[in-house]
Image: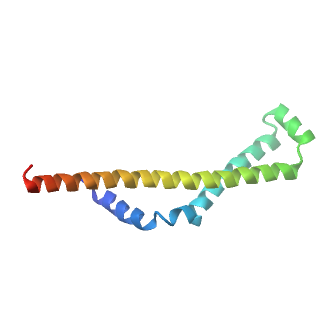
Amino acid sequence: MITDEEEKFYQYWSQTRKTYKTSLRPYLKGLSIGFAIGVGILLTIYQGWYTRANMQANTVLNPYLFLLAISIVAFFMAFIYRNYQWEQQEQRFQIISAKKMREEKNLSNAALGH
């Protein structure tokens, strides 16, 4: 039996599944997660929590290169997050679709008297 929540999701996802992969909202959410990870790395290095990494970063690494690397990580996280969310929603949609098909099959078999 399909619940009301599942039916609402089925209707919502059947309308938005094509445009979700190009939507900006999940991308921005993933981008903020990526930048949060980058800020955490920066704080770890600049506070001197790991002395050896701090020495290495201060002697060899160009700060602009480091910011570029963090930006690349953030954009990669945004892309992965958006695709992950789409896959999760699509899997839920497929499960609900299978439930609906099974219910329709059971109803048609019951109507035929099988």
Lateral position of residue 17 relative to residue 110, left or right? right
**Where residue 89 sits: x, y (%)?**
45, 55
Task: Give the total number of marks visible in the rendering.
Answer: 0
Q: How is the image coloured?
A: rainbow
Q: Nearer the viewer, residue 100 or 26?
A: 100
- Residue in view at x 79 percent, y 33 percent: 50
Residue 82: x and y in percent read 57, 56
**Residue 6 is drawn in which quadrant?**
bottom left
- Is 82 situated left or right of 13 in this image? right
Residue 109 can be seen in this image: yes
Towards the viewer: 80 or 39? 80
In this view, 43 is above or below 23: above
Q: Is residue 35 visible?
A: no
Residue at figure coordinates x 56%, y 65% from the top left: 23
Vertical placement of residue 82 versus 57, above or below: below
> What's the residue at 16%, 55% (across, down)?
107
Residue farthest along the right direction in this orientation: 59
Residue pictured at 68% horizontal, 47% vertical: 37
- Which residue of the protein is positioned furthest toward the top in this rendering? 52
- Find residue 13 and report its horizontal and vertical position in percent: 41, 62
Q: Position of residue 39 (x, y in %)?
A: 73, 49
Taking depth in this image into account, of 2 and 53 the one nearest to the observer is 2
